[in-house]
Amino acid sequence: MVSYKELGLVNTREMFKGAIKGQYAIPAYNFNNMEQIQAIITACVETQSPVILQVSSGARKYANQVLLRYMGQGAVEMMKSMAAEKGLKEIPIALHLDHGDTFELAKSCIETGFSSVMIDGSHHSFADNIALTKKVVEFAHQHDVTVEGELGVLAGIEDEVSSEKSHYTQPEEVVEFVSKTGVDSLAISIGTSHGANKFKPEQCTKNADGIFIPPELRFDILEEIEKKIPGFPIVLHGASSVPIEAVKIINANGGALKDSVGIPEEQIRKAAKSAVCKVNIDSDGRLWMTAAIRKTFAEKPAEFDPRKYLGPARDALVTMYKQKNQNVLGSAGKA
């Protein structure tokens, strides 16, 4: 058993208290490799933002669970060194399991140093979701690890999570779910979706500049949930904006991404001023990383040194993460 405290990590409890009080959201960025985690830490130290490093079950298989533990610890050490070098404050870092689907997976992550876990029982019946979530909470809280549950189902595909249709969270269910499970935060479904293909153009309207505008998030559902469980931490998954600039770069350099529309950043900012205190962003990072790599390969076809194409990809990620912290989530300066 390795405690997250030994690795210098924190759980999400105090993070969420600050976010709710300050009307901002903590960035929850997924990572799979060294360049991604370097970019996340660089951006968050430079913007002085707390951060949640997210690992999906697929990423855990890809990177190896022991290596991930050391990457989490390494992220803390990198943060401390960078903060000291730049004369900045140290920032709180949580290591979180994203979309854990079994008790065994959540337990394994807790035992290897994760400070927060999500147990996603949304594909089960309401009663079975409660039972599974409660079991994870009871084990996690023995080790002071925070737990995120989920009510409602997001459409889309990302990593090993997929659903053809979304099912909005039912506000009348949240009180029973939270009280019976003891979860520390709740992921809800109000119109966001997983992956890069969130909305097709035909699902959207066009503004005067010819830009596709997707249906607005169901803020009415969010408001009802806030009334039912006032002050309780809410989480948004599938909140990438799918930047058209990145998609254009990818397709101009040999890619073949379909037309897609993400969640407008102004809607995420609006949500972050409410009880939404954690926002998951994964696809945007994948898009900008791929855009930078494809551009390098197109401009320098003889290049074979990974540092020469992963370096620009890392730089693109730093720019994106800083912009999210400063202009979308409002977490900059909140460390």
Image (cartoon, grey):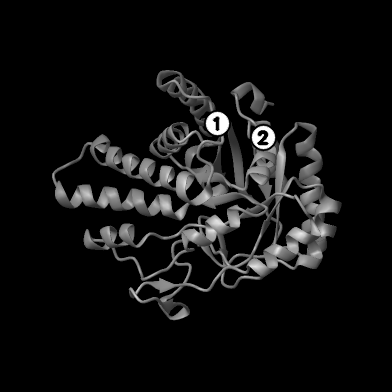
Q: Is residue 52 visible?
A: yes
Nearer the N terminus, badge 1 or badge 2?
Answer: 2
- Looking at the rendered structure, the kind of residue marked 2 is Asn
What residue do we see at 79% from left, 56% from top?
A: 229
Does 20 sit left or right of 205 as displayed?
right
For mark 2, give the secondary structure: loop
Q: Position of residue 39 (x, y in %)?
A: 40, 37
Q: Position of residue 25 (x, y in %)?
A: 59, 47
Q: Position of residue 307 (x, y in %)?
A: 27, 35
Q: Which residue is mark 1?
A: 66
Give the vertical position of 135 relative to 263 (above or below): above
Does 319 sit left or right of 177 as displayed?
left
In the rendered structure, find residue 11 and report the number of the disc placed on it.
2
Total marks placed: 2
What residue do we see at 44% from left, 75% from top?
A: 200
What residue do we see at 47% from left, 79% from top?
A: 203
Q: Which picture quadrant has residue 252?
A: bottom left
Distance from Cα at disc 1 to Cα at disc 2: 19 Å
Q: Position of residue 14 (x, y in %)?
A: 69, 35
Give the vertical position of 12 relative to 252 (above or below): above
Q: Are marks 1 and 2 in contact (CB under 8 Å)?
A: no
